[in-house]
Image (spheres, grey):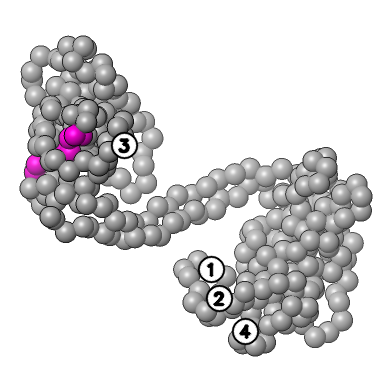
Amino acid sequence: MPEVLKAPLVVEFPFTRSLGPVQSAFLSGLRERVLLGVKTNDGRTLVPPVEYDPVTAEEIRDLVEVAPTGTVTTWAWNHEPRRGQPLDTPFAWALVRLDGADTALLHALDAPGPDAVHTGMRVRVRWATERTGAITDIACFEPHHGDPHRPSGHTGEFADPVTGIVAAARLDYTYSPGRAQSAYITALAERRTVGERCPVCRKVYVPPRGACPTCGVATSEQVQVGPRGTVTTFCIVNIKARNLDIEVPYVYAHIALDGADLALHGRIAGIPYDQVRMGLRVEPVWTEGARYPDHYRPTGEPDADYETYKELL
């Protein structure tokens, strides 16, 4: 049995969102070192602010300034900060109820160690040197032994409000494809494509999953398929992906390899994008040292009859 593979994997993309009037005021305030909450109809002040009352679901827009000092309501010590976290030395994650607020704000608390942190301790905001209108404008909280600070009475109106933000979403993890897909990937390195046959319905699935998606039984019988196949359906890509050195437009297609009962996807090249069609017969093109086909190109054969691949759309 081939070795089960594993590898580090990163999924990362920028997430862009527009802001409503409440969130716009909150982030604009952080940029100006002003902390804003929103007051509900029953008199509660919510920080961070929301646009709808979590109890009554009523829309709320009555902004009110709160103080940059507050009280820790609960906390947890972070022994090993990760990339992108507020501090690069051990710190506490803390819920801080700012003076004048009725809810708590989650942020980092800079302290020399867990023995220096306790529920009920007084803290204050440490502002970032450069502020852009984001939650990171609060660098962290720090212990505070003085009197509560007083808000300035800001109205929440700003001449140049923040209207949108871009947040980088990133997920780092180790992926293990398992027995079936490890065998599939190992075969690809030898320029072979293998699937697994279900012992009940006898269908061959590529890439294999280790179990039949229809019958729900384990699969183990390997079957070599392809290398040629048929385009079952496709899309034309007109937006260039970051870090992908392929000129647009190009075609990405579902390809039913000969002998397979499930279509896999691949890029189509060697033909103008507007000439790609359902039923087009294609074959893989490999580059030196690659572990998978770079793309698929037309074989020159007549198009496959629709009846031969309609069940694989």
Foreground mark, 1 or 2, reads 2
Q: Secondary structure at mark 3?
A: loop
Coordinates of residue 186 in the picture (x, y in percent): 14, 51
Viewer-proximal residue, 231 or 56? 56
Which corner quadrant of the image does residue 142 belong to? Answer: bottom right
Q: Is residue 185 above or below residue 4?
A: above
Coordinates of residue 204 in the picture (x, y in percent): 18, 32
**Residue under numbered circle 2:** 78
Q: Magenta stretch?
A: 191-199
Coordinates of residue 235 in the picture (x, y in percent): 33, 26
The amino acid type, in three-letter code, at marker 1 is Gln
Q: How many marks?
A: 4
Disc 1 and disc 2 in contact, CB within 8 angstroms: yes
Q: Earlier in the sequence, mark 2 or mark 3?
A: 2
**Residue under numbered circle 4:** 114
> Disc 2 and disc 3: Cα gap in Å?
42 Å
Name the quarter where the N terminus is drawn: bottom left
Whether residue 258 is visible, yes or no, is: yes
The amino acid type, in three-letter code, at marker 4 is Pro
> Disc 1 and disc 2: Cα gap in Å?
10 Å
**Residue under numbered circle 3:** 216
The amino acid type, in three-letter code, at marker 2 is Asn
> Disc 4 and disc 2: Cα gap in Å?
9 Å
Say whether residue 295 is left or right of residue 224.
right
Q: Residue at x 52, y 47 (%)?
A: 15
Q: Which mark is residue 85?
A: 1
Viewer-proximal residue, 140 or 227? 227
